[in-house]
Image (cartoon, coloured by chain):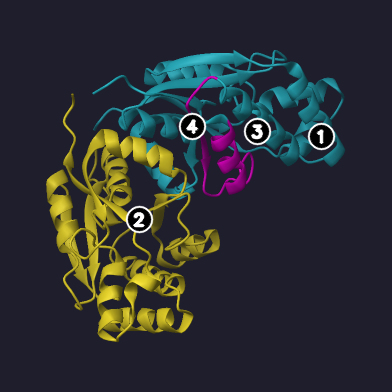
Chain colours: A yellow, B cyan
């Protein structure tokens, strides 16, 4: 085989982005897990530990805190997180597209945010001459089954210690500005990947 | 690992459905390639040969010719193949869902037909208590790159000897009824999988 093509997977330490990484790895890509951080709070630790537990390369990319601040302003104005989270995700993909030929994330069929529309994907791929992929072809039942089979998972209420989602730094900045983050982000259960599941 | 979960992949012998099969196989599913035939013309031979060349299990499932006949009537009325092909694909998935827990096909991001809408997938999964997946998260550039890397491909104008798409039996029935199939189905290049590409 010739030189492996590098693929960056936006990585939170959760099962969706881990599964995306596994698929690309098994298809022969040179996978680099990438976690974004805006310097507000080091939310990358859970992702780094998960990446290590699976043996993948992992990189934290620090981006301008203005991207986070703009998203938080949008969230405060909307009193709803969707547009702000999408703003971050779109901006991050635009930036990554300058450095990687193949970019992927773990968004799956049912996910509404963050999510790129078909036309946005076409535009990103054409303008930047890259390839983008995600898990939109796969539903939560299949992702759950497959993750349970492949990974050791640690489940718990999502918080700054077990997730590297964009949400974590958003929460920190919202709190700093005096907002009730539990109202904007309902509590949800987070499954963090903590290793490969051994064959039984 | 416990007993492998069986997954049926609708299989034409092309690179898309082959890639879907490879992904499920690598994720640990017990993959069974399934080619549909309506008894009008044995269009399953290219798919059977491709399946053999990759070492996957392959099964031809014969379905009622009325499904094909209804599709051809739709195509004649529309003078356009889309609704007829979608009719076949939807009917086939409904029938497969009675026998398999996991069903997949090779439809990719850009494909317009055959294609299930999000709401149709949800409905199919819920009513039949199955899981359905496809390649909607992946675009043609990534599929081409990956297929070139994984498979030996034989390219040629799509015809009844190199493809097991639904289109092949539709063409035979349309011709029998005196219609010009080249007008309804524009010629296109078909990449048939004829084996694994050896590492170089």
Whether A94 is drawn above or below B162: the answer is below
**How far apart are the two marked residues, 4 and 3, measured between alpha carbons?**
16 Å
Which residue is tagged 3?
Answer: B90
Residue B170 is tagged as none
Q: Is residue B174 magenta?
A: no
Neighbourhood count class around disc 4 (C-alpha, 10 Å): few under 14, some 14–19, many 20 upward: many
Q: Position of residue A11 (x, y in %)?
A: 26, 57
Counting from the top left corner in percent of width and height, residue B171 is at 74, 26
- The question of residue B100 being in magenta is answered with yes
Say which residue appears at 67% left-offset and 25% top-offset. Answer: B168
Label annotation for residue B74: 1
Determine whether the residue tagged by mark 1 lies in a helix, strand or loop: helix
The quarter of the rendered structure image containing the C terminus of chain B is top left
Magenta segment: B99-127
Residue B178 percent across, percent down from the top left = 87, 25
Question: Chain under label 1?
Answer: B
* A7 lies left or right of B14: left
Residue under numbered circle 4: B17
């Amino acid at each position: 085989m010739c030189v492996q093509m590098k693929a960056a997977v936006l990585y939170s330490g959760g099962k969706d982005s881990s599964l995306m990484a596994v698929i690309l790895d098994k298809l022969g890509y040179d996978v680099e897990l990438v976690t974004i951080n805006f310097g507000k709070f080091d939310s990358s630790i859970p992702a780094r530990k998960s990446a290590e537990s699976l043996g993948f390369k992992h990189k934290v990319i620090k981006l301008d805190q203005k991207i986070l601040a703009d998203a938080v302003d949008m969230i405060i104005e909307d009193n709803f997180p969707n547009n702000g989270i999408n703003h971050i995700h779109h901006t991050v993909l635009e930036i990554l597209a300058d450095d990687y030929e193949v970019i992927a994330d773990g968004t799956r069929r049912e996910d509404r945010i963050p999510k790129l529309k078909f036309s946005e994907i076409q535009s990103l791929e054409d303008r930047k001459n890259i390839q983008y992929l995600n898990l939109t072809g796969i539903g939560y039942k299949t992702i759950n089954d497959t993750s349970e089979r492949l990974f050791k998972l640690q489940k718990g209420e999502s918080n700054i210690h077990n997730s590297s989602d964009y949400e974590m730094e958003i929460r920190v900045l919202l709190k700093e500005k005096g907002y009730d983050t539990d109202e904007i982000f309902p509590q949800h259960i987070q499954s963090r990947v903590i290793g490969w599941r051994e064959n039984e």
